[in-house]
Image (cartoon, rainbow, N blue to C red):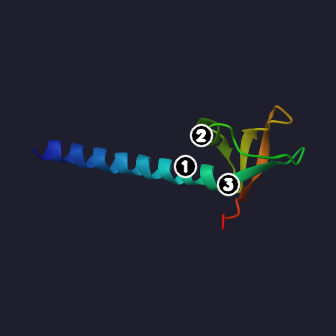
Amino acid sequence: MTDIILIIVTVCILGGGITWCFLVHLNLFKHYHYVCIKCATSYKPTTFSQSLFGINGGDQRKLKCPKCNKREWANAIKDKPRV
């Protein structure tokens, strides 16, 4: 009986953690744009999966730049709130 409870608690904790990480990243995807270091092009990733699987380096992500057409480091810039 305790094994079943332990499994249920573990699944709930892991599921909650994964859901939390997904929601945080979705918020970042919606509220940030990126500026390519090489060509200074400002853009948003075209898909959520591009942003989700981009290598994260703190305030930078390695994403595919639409102008360079290569995976380059880009600075993350917070979008201005709409009034």
5 up-or-down from 83: above or below: above
Tag of residue 26: 1
- Kind of residue indicated by mark 2: Phe
The Cα atoms of the two marked residues, 1 and 2, are separated by: 8 Å
List x then y, in percent, for residue 66.
80, 36
List x then y, in percent, for residue 40.
88, 48
- Kind of residue indicated by mark 3: Tyr
Q: Which of 51 and 82 is in front in this view?
A: 82
Ranked by sequence position, the earlier of labels 1 and 2 is 1
Ranked by sequence position, the earlier of labels 1 and 3 is 1
- Where residue 45 sits, quadrant-wise, is top right
Q: Mark 2 points at which residue?
A: 48
Whether label 1 touches label 2, CB < 8 Å? yes
The Cα atoms of the two marked residues, 3 and 2, are separated by: 12 Å
Q: What element carries label 2?
A: helix
Residue visible at 17% across and 47% down in the picture: 5
27 up-or-down from 4: above or below: below
List x then y, in percent, for residue 31.
63, 56
Residue visible at 66% across and 40% down in the picture: 54
Q: What element carries label 3?
A: strand
Residue visible at 79% across and 38% down in the picture: 65
Tag of residue 68: none
Q: Quadrant of the N terminus?
A: top left
Asked if residue 7 lies left or right of residue 37, the reply is: left
Ranked by sequence position, the earlier of labels 3 and 2 is 3
The Cα atoms of the two marked residues, 1 and 3, are separated by: 10 Å
Q: Mark 3 points at which residue?
A: 32
